[in-house]
Amino acid sequence: MTETTGPRVRLIVECSYWLVAVVFFVYLFIYFWTSEGGPTLLAMTLVPVTYVLFVLNGLRENDFYPALPPWTNYVIAAIYIGLALAVAAYMHTEYYEIGTERGRGKVAGEQIEFEHRVTNVYRREGGQWKMVHHHTDVSPAMVEVLRRLQAA
């Protein structure tokens, strides 16, 4: 930032940074102690919090957007932090998983191995994650078997 900010604002940024850092540490400590929620919930919680720490540290060290005036940096930082917290809150209620499923099966008496892309949507209901949607692309191996069956 091109000019210095008042001591009160600097104190607020400094205290906010350390408060978020302590919350980050405590959450991580509890996770390592209990493994509660699993690694996906850990990542969904702490990635946005890490981004908040990054933004606050940029403000602390006056290198967030150094060419802009301080008040602009604070407005931009507030927007970034608000968006990160909104993402964290949303990811605690619903998230999407994209992956690949592999398997073996019989189609029309023929043994095939398949691999297809999937999208799963999970929603947190009553403290439990529930799959509310599952989509699978058609497997090329299955398409080949069906093509041969149609030709026969």
Image (cartoon, helix red, strand yellow):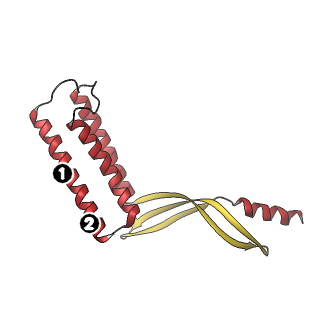
Specify few, some or many for label 2: CA neighbours under 10 Å numbering under 14, 14-19, or 20 or more: few
Check disc 1 and give the amino acid type.
Leu
Location of the N terminus (image quadrant): top left
Residue 92: numbered disc:
none
Mark 2 vs mark 1: which is more N-terminal?
1
Identify the residue at image location x=70%, y=73%. Answer: 105
Identify the residue at image location x=68%, y=60%. Answer: 138
Q: Which residue, as the protein is rendered here, is positioned at the far left?
A: 7
Report x, y in % for residue 43. Answer: 37, 57
Q: Is residue 39 left or right of residue 98?
A: left
Total numbered circles: 2
Report x, y in % for residue 132. Answer: 50, 65
Location of the C terminus (image quadrant): bottom right
| Residue 3, above or below 18 | above
Q: Is residue 26 left or right of residue 41?
A: left
Q: Is residue 139 left or right of residue 47?
A: right
Residue closest to the eye, 66 or 125:
66
User: Which SS class for mark 1?
Assistant: helix
Q: Quadrant of residue 143?
A: bottom right
Task: Report, in whole angstroms, how far the alpha carbon at label 2 lies from the one at label 1.
Answer: 17 Å
User: Which SS class for mark 2?
Assistant: helix
Report x, y in % for residue 130. Answer: 45, 68
Q: Dot 1 corresponds to which residue?
A: 19
Check disc 2 and give the amino acid type.
Ile
Residue closest to the eye, 107 or 102:
102
| Residue 141, above or below 5 | below
Q: Dot 2 corresponds to which residue?
A: 30
